């Protein structure tokens, strides 16, 4: 079985978060979802657990960061093409997200970023495969 990652993110309003990510074309796994949690399926091995703040608090003794004021994490997703980067970023903005940073275009790499309704920063990046061939 391949290794998986479950990123846990606190959300103020679970239905708002689910609606936002649903508009970006993501689905949810009902097996790992309930009235306080939604398992956002990013790929076969990558998931974001959207947890209401009270539920999230059950997993930590620390205070929950106010993502509108501080940055705790940057979530970066790869895209198949420059066009797919634009599609996802534009969809996020149309769904109620907000811009995070200026687009970055380095020729061989292109990326845009947005904030979800809870101000978590998501980056969508495409890299030209020929630019990384032979690296490593």
Image: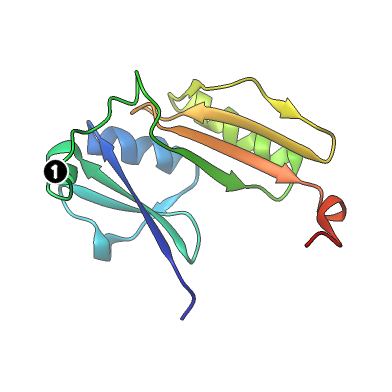
Q: Residue at x 46, y 49 (%)?
A: 26
- Give how far across and how far down residue 120 sits, in percent: 40, 32
Q: Is residue 65 left or right of residue 25?
A: left
- Give how far across and how far down residue 25 sits, in percent: 50, 46
Q: Name the residue beneath numbered marker 1.
A: 61
Q: Quadrant of the C terminus?
A: bottom right
Q: Residue at x 32, y 36 (%)?
A: 17
- Give how far across and how far down residue 33 sits, in percent: 23, 56
Residue closer to the observer: 76 or 98 = 76
Q: Is residue 21 left or right of residue 17?
A: right
Q: Residue at x 34, y 18 (%)?
A: 69
Estimate how packed mark 1 is, as few (under 14), some (14 to 19) or many (20 or more) residues with alpha carbons within 10 Å: few
Q: Residue at x 71, y 50 (%)?
A: 80
User: Height in image: 5 above or below 113?
Assistant: below
Q: Is residue 36 left or right of residue 89?
A: left
Of helix, strand and loop, which one carries label 1?
A: loop
Residue closer to the observer: 22 or 14 = 14
Q: Within the image, what quadrant is residue 129 found in? A: bottom right
User: Height in image: 110 above or below 48?
Assistant: above
């Amino acid at each position: 079985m391949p290794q998986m990652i479950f990123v846990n993110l606190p959300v103020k309003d679970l239905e708002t978060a689910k609606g936002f990510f649903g508009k970006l074309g993501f689905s949810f796994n009902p097996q790992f979802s309930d009235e306080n949690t939604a398992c956002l399926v990013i790929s076969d091995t990558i998931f974001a657990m959207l947890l209401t703040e009270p539920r999230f608090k059950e997993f930590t003794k620390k205070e929950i960061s106010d993502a509108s004021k501080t940055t705790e994490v940057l979530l970066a997703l790869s895209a198949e093409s420059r066009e797919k980067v634009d599609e996802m970023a534009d969809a996020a903005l149309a769904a109620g997200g907000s811009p995070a940073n200026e687009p970055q275009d380095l020729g061989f790499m292109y990326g845009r970023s947005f904030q979800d309704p809870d101000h978590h920063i998501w980056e969508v990046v495409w890299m030209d495969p020929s630019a990384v061939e032979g690296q490593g």
